[in-house]
């Protein structure tokens, strides 16, 4: 297995069932060097957060991103203070994992009045909190967001907020589901500054699914949008994107499988993307990753 | 500030119905003031009423060794903390606190610049303003008869204190006991004064820290061609203080050849201003201070760099006419 082709692909822990240690082992054995985690991975560990962090460090896996579903931005008053406390806890967990990137999906909560300014103010505050911790924030629009539902809306907000450590997380689910013609998609993607595109989350889609209107998230290559997904990755590469790809496929079927099985399937997806789609045959030059360490 | 990227507003394919931001002219800049959603109220250049550095604090397990270094540099020990192993050193308007009070993890033998105290108009207001903009508050542990000085987290493990009692009376009058028989206001060696602080940062972190100091404290980056002293690397931020108390923060990233950055963000050294660098160097040399003299760094009228003591303590002298 040529793991050099998988260096910037991370496995999403949510794709696998089982205890954290078993999932870490499965990811490692499948040839990945990176993983994406979320708060539940840590707080549900029977030994507590410290033990979970120790597991992650012992695994040798770098944590590419930390998923923080905290419905943060857009609130005011007591709800904002509550969410601020939650977001601070998420940042601390991210820091404990020595993870350089916190992914913030757009909030599901309807924003208070004065939408635009509340959203900008909230994101500025969160990004500022992340600076001393050396953490970047990747903001992600998604269909469940109350005010921000697309990556273009999220990008607008990132630009408006204008913080150096705030960028975008792009989920292929939105792109594939929208089925935008390739030329229009390329025009949309060209609006993004790839230096501010901090993460690309890759999933293929498979329909019909259990939930009507919600195609199942499956690993790249396992779904019905194989060509569109390959075209998206090639387009992003052509636009200059050199960041990480997170294999963010999770569904009830994967959750019913042993983690090793899912991780091996993910490995096959990563190799398909790395070798066949991006056509990497040897380790790329200048691929040494500089570690970002947290200091507060 | 980073450059504002292209927004969908200028591009044709972004539908107006998608853009929830279209109905507002809000930008990050005019969100900084309460009430900005009703009218344009721009804060001044110095929103906290910053008036210089009140003190710089070192933490060390070897306070006497650091004390000797400070005395060689012309500082005098003038007061002790009432309840903790903390000493106040002073020369002219420069206060340096040496903290050997163990709290939590043991202190390192190597002294570390652990705090910078800033003089502000209203410490409580400055603290609240910083928290609203995303600073981390530092919980304080005040003993009986001690001042509660609000602080936020700075780089690394350091803190930034806000002090507003620097005019009518001094914070040291409350928390410190003067050392008997010692001049409480020893003159500065050759007119030395605070000039700035050098902060080491990680790769590609200049924009982050520039925004941190700009947004929270009102610092502004200087143009690249404006440099002081003999160590011009990195980015220099100017405090918004009046000219007589102005100071600078110099942000320095690793050399391009350094690939693995390990936990190395922190406050590295203090810069002291002098109207006559060569005279100051001569006076300090008589006191036993040695200065670096190498092909790339050597004493000149622009500045000088002391040799490093205790593995990490050095002082930079920078030409700066004050007052």
Image: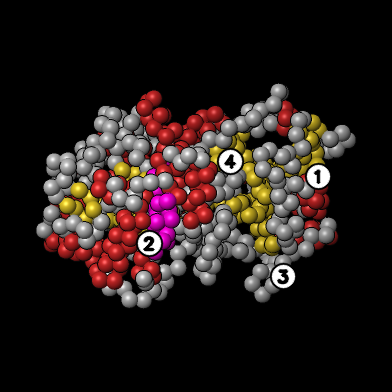
Q: Are marks 2 and 1 on the same chain?
A: no
Q: CA distance from mark 2 to mark 1?
A: 63 Å
Q: Earlier in the sequence, mark 1 or mark 3?
A: 1
Q: Give SS at disc 1.
A: strand
Badge 3: residue crowd in 10 Å (few <14, some 14–19, many ≥20): few
Q: CA distance from mark 1 to mark 3?
A: 27 Å
| Relative image position of residue B286 (x, y in whole percent) | 84, 60
| Relative image position of residue A200 (x, y in whole percent) | 30, 56
The image's mark for residue B160 is: 4
**In this view of the protein, can residue A187 be seen by the observer?**
no
> Looking at the image, which residue is at 57% across and 35% down?
B138
> Magenta segment, which residues?
A22-39
Q: Is residue B60 magenta?
A: no
**Which residue lies under the disc numbered 1?**
B76
Query: Badge 3 sits on which subunit?
Result: B
Q: Earlier in the sequence, mark 1 or mark 4?
A: 1
Q: Earlier in the sequence, mark 3 or mark 4?
A: 4
Q: CA distance from mark 3 to mark 2?
A: 55 Å
Badge 1: residue crowd in 10 Å (few <14, some 14–19, many ≥20): many
**Which residue lies under the disc numbered 3?**
B293
Circle 2/circle 4 CB separation < 8 Å: no
Badge 2: residue crowd in 10 Å (few <14, some 14–19, many ≥20): many
């Amino acid at each position: 297995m040529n793991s050099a082709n998988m260096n910037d692909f991370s496995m999403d822990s949510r794709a696998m069932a089982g205890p954290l240690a078993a999932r870490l082992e499965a990811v490692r054995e499948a040839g990945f060097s990176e993983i994406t985690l979320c708060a539940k991975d840590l707080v549900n560990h029977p030994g507590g957060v410290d033990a979970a962090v120790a597991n992650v460090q012992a695994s040798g896996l770098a944590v590419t991103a930390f998923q923080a579903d905290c419905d943060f931005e857009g609130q005011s008053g007591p709800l904002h203070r509550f969410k601020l406390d939650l977001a601070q806890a998420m940042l601390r967990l991210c820091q404990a994992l020595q993870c350089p990137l916190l992914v913030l999906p757009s909030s599901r909560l309807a924003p208070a009045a004065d939408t635009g300014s509340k959203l900008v103010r909230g994101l500025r505050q969160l990004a500022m909190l992340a600076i001393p911790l050396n953490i970047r924030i990747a903001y992600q629009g998604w269909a469940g967001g109350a005010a921000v539902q697309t990556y273009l809306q999220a990008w607008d907000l990132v630009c408006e907020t204008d913080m150096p450590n705030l960028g975008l997380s792009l989920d292929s689910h939105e792109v594939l589901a929208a089925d935008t013609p390739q030329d229009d998609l390329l025009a949309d993607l060209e609006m993004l500054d790839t230096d501010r595109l901090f993460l690309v989350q890759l999933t293929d889609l498979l329909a019909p699914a259990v939930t009507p209107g919600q195609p199942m998230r499956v690993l790249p290559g396992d779904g019905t949008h194989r060509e569109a997904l390959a075209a998206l990755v090639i387009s992003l590469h052509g636009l200059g994107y050199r960041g990480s790809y997170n294999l963010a496929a999770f569904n009830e079927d994967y959750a019913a499988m042993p983690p090793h099985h899912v991780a091996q399937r993910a490995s096959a997806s990563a190799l398909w993307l790395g070798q066949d789609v991006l056509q990497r045959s040897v380790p790329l030059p200048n691929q040494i990753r500089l570690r970002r360490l947290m200091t507060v | 500030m980073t450059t504002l990227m292209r927004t969908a507003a200028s591009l044709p394919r972004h539908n107006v119905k998608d853009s929830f931001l279209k109905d507002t002219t809000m930008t990050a800049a005019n969100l900084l003031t309460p009430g900005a959603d009703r009218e344009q109220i721009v804060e001044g250049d110095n929103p906290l009423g910053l008036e210089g550095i009140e003190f710089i604090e070192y933490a060390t397990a070897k306070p006497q060794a650091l004390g000797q270094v400070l005395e060689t540099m012309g500082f005098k020990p003038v007061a002790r903390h009432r309840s903790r192993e903390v000493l106040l050193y002073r020369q002219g308007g420069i206060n340096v606190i040496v903290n050997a009070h163990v709290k939590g993890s043991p202190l390192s033998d190597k002294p570390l610049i652990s705090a910078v105290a800033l003089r502000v108009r209203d410490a409580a207001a400055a603290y609240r303003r910083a928290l609203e903009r995303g600073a981390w508050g530092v919980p304080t542990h005040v003993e009986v008869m001690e001042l509660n000085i609000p602080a936020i987290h700075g780089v690394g493990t350091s803190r930034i204190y806000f002090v507003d009692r620097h005019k009518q009376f001094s914070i040291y009058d409350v928390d410190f006991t003067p050392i008997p028989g010692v001049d409480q206001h020893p003159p500065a060696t050759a007119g030395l004064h605070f000039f700035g602080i050098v902060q080491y940062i990680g790769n590609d972190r200049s924009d982050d820290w520039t925004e941190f100091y700009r947004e929270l404290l009102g610092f502004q980056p200087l143009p690249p061609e404006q440099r002081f002293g003999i160590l011009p690397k990195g980015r220099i931020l100017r405090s918004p203080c009046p000219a007589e108390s102005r100071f600078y923060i110099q942000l320095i990233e690793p050399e391009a050849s350094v690939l693995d950055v390990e936990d190395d963000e922190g406050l590295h050294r203090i810069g002291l201003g002098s109207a006559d660098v060569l005279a100051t160097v001569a006076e300090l040399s008589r006191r036993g201070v040695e200065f670096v003299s190498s092909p790339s760094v050597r004493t000149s009228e622009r500045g000088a760099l002391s040799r490093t003591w205790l593995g990490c303590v050095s002082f930079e002298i920078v030409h700066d006419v004050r007052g």
